[in-house]
Image (tube, rainbow, N blue to C red):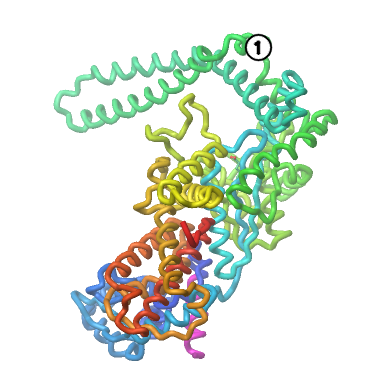
Amino acid sequence: MQAKRINRRLLAYMNYNRGSAQLVAPCMKLLSEIKARFEPALKSFADSEAQVSSLLAMIKPTQDDGFGDYQVNCAMALGKQLGKAPRDIAAELLQTVPLDDICEKAELAGPGFINLTFKDSWVIEQLLQAKSDDNLGVEQVDSPRTVVIDLSSPNVAKPMHVGHIRSTVIGDALANIHRFIGHKVITDNHLGDWGTQFGMIIYGYKHFVDQAAYQKNPVLELSRLYKYVRVLMDYHAAVQKLPEAQELKQKQLEALERIQSADHGDNKGKLKQQKKDIQRLKEKLTVQDELIASYTSALEDCDPQVAEVAKQHAQVGQQVLAETARLHEGDTENRALWDEFLPYCLEDIQRIYDRLNIKFDHILGESYYQDQLQGVVAELTANGLATESDGAMCVFMDGFEAPMIIRKKDGAFLYPTTDLATIKHRVHEWQADSMLYVVDHRQHDHFDKLFAAAKLWGYNDVEMTHVSFGTVMGDDGKPFKTRAGDTVGLEGLLDEAESRALAVAREQNPNLEDSRQQEIGRVVGLGALKYADLSQNRTSDYKFSYDKMLALRGNTATYLQYANARVHGILRKLDTDTEKLKAAADELVFTESVERQLAMQLLRFDEVIYDVLIEYKPNLLCNYLFDLAQLFARFFDQCSVRDSKTTAIQRSRLQLCGMTSRTLTCGLGLLGIESLERI
Ligand code: ARG
C-alpha cells in the first residue's frame, strides 16, 4: 500500500512537469495499476524521470481484444536505446514485474510487445468497487488546483449568435469535468460590456429610439437599435470601400492573366510555381468577390428609406466611436445610459443561459476592470516593459513582429489592457493556478501576445492556455448564416432544435401527455445542440445540421438519451433502479465475452475523464459514451436479462445495466446534458 502511494506521488510529480498535462491526476484505475507495477522496473532501464514518464505513456489499452486488455510497448524504444533485442528486454520485464495477482495472461508478442489480460476476478473486484462509489470509481486528484475558466464572454448589447454556443458549452463541460475530479473551478464570463457596441446603441437611442416600444420591451428595442445602426454603418463602409475593392479585384485579374500567359516551356520548377500562384490568386479572387458581393448587397438591398437615413447620417461611424469615447471618459449622460441599458442586455443573455442551464461563478465583464487600466499601464511602464512608440504605449516582445498596444495615442485603453488587468485579478484575488480561455481560434495572436506579456510582467507560475475552437459552418461549407446572410441567433437555434425534437418525441410516443412531450422536446433538443458541438474535435470547423444532431442512430445525444431511457425501462420491468442496484450486495459473473467487454468499458470511464483534460477535448468523452452505448446494445442483444439462466446471472446483468445507465447519466451530465428515465 505504502509503495503504491509513493508511486502515485511520483507519477503526479512527473505529470506535473509535462506542460498542460500537469492537471492530470496519477490515478487511473486499470492503467495506473499497470503503470505502478511497471514503473520500478522501467526505472532500472531509464536514465531520467522524463524517460520513465515517456516509457509509461507507451502502456495503452489494446485496439483489439485478441491482444488482451492492455499492451506495454516500451521494449522497442528501450531496445533501440540500449542496443539490446527488444524481445529480451520484454522478457526481462515480464520476469521482474509482479503481475500474477491481477493478470490472467502476460504474453510476449511480435518484436517485443507485452500483452496483458486481466483476471476476471480482478476486473469484477474493480467494477464492484466502482459500483459502490458515487463517482463511479473515478479517482480524485491528489493535489487539487484552482482552475479559472474564461467562457462564453459574448459582447453584449447585441443578440447572442451561433458563434457563442461553442465557448459556452465547451467551457461548461471543462468546468464540470475539472470539478468532478476535485479541482477547484472558478468560471468567469468575461462579458464584452464596454465596447463600441454600446456606442452604437447610445447613438441609436439618441437618434432613433421609439419610446413607446422601449417602454414596452426595452431589450427588443435596444436590439433593434443595434441592428439599425449596424445597417447604417455597413452602408457607409460599403460606399467607401466598394470602389477600392473593385480596383483591387481588377489588379488581381490582371495579375492572374499575366501569370497564366507566362510561358515556362518545360521548366518543371517554374510550371509548378505557376500552378501554385494561379491557385493562390484564384482563392484571393473568391474572397474578393465575396467582399464585393457583401458591399453591393449592403447598398442595393438596403431599404430606400433606410438608405435615405444613412445619407443623412454620413458620419455615423465616427459618431459611434465618439459616443464610445465619451462613455469611457466618464461623460454623465452616456454613463447614465450605459447604467440603464446594461441590466436589459444582461437580462437578454441570461434568458439564454437559463435555457442552456449554464451558471457562472462570476460575470466580471470588461467594464469591471476600467479603473484598473491606468495602473496596469503605469506598472508596465515603470518596470520598463511598455515603451512609447508614436504616442502609443506598446509592449515589444521577442518573437512577435508587432507590439502589443496597451494605450492608444488618444489615451484609449484596449482589449489586451483589460485582459492584463483580468490576469492580475484572477491571480491575486482567486489564487489561480491555471487559466483556460475558451475562445475562438481567430484570437490566437491576441492570446499568444497576452500570455507572453503576462509572463514578462511576472506571472510565471500560473499556467495560461488558449482553448481555441473552430467555426460553425452551414451546409455550404461557409460560416453558418441565415438565408438573408445574417448571423444565426442563438435563441432561434434553441427554439428550432426543441421544436424538431418535440416532433420526434410526438412521433415516437403519440400517446404521451403533452407536458411530458414538451419536456422531452426540451431535453432532447438542447442535448442535441450541445452534443453536436462537443462531439466535434474542438479545433476543427464543423457543419451544423439539425437532422444529423437529432438522429436516433449515430453519435448523437439523442441516441445516448434514448439508449439510457431504454436501460431504465429494463430496470423498471425487473422492479429495480440504479439506486437500489448501487446499494445491493451482488456478485458479478461473466458468462459471455460481451459482458466482460462491457465491464472493461465501464472501468475505462476513469481513464477517459483524465484523457479529456490532457488536451481539453470533450469529444473524447462523447466518443467513449457512444462506444459504451453501442457495446451495451450488443450486450443486450446477446444476453437476455429477463430470461437469464440463474438469478445470480440476472443480478450480475442487472448490475451491468445499472452501471451503464449511471455512467451514461454521469457522462452526459458532465457535458451539461440532461438524461430522462422515460422517453
Ligand atoms: N468578448 C470577446 C469576443 O466576443 C471574447 C472575450 C474572451 N475572453 C477574454 N478574456 N478575452 O470576441
Instruction: Report if the beta carbon of the residue with label 1 is closer than 8 angstroms to ligand 1.
Output: no
View extreme (front): residue: 511
Look at the image and tell me whether residue 239 can be seen. Answer: yes
View extreme (left): residue: 266
Compared across the picture, whether 584 is left or right of 353 comes to: left
Look at the image and tell me whether residue 448 can be seen. Answer: no
Q: Is residue 50 magenta?
A: no
Q: 580 or 275: nearer the eye?
A: 580
Q: In this figure, which residue is indicated by the disc labeled 1?
A: 309
Q: Which residues are magenta?
A: 1-15
Q: Is residue 8 magenta?
A: yes
Coordinates of residue 394 in the picture (x, y in percent): 65, 39
Q: SS of the residue at dot 1?
A: helix
Coordinates of residue 26 in the picture (x, y in percent): 48, 75
- Above-or-below relation of 366 to 14: above
- The amino acid pointed to by label 1 is Val
Q: 407 or 542: nearer the eye?
A: 542
Q: Ligand 1 appears in which quadrant?
A: top right
- Which quadrant of the figure has residue 267? top left
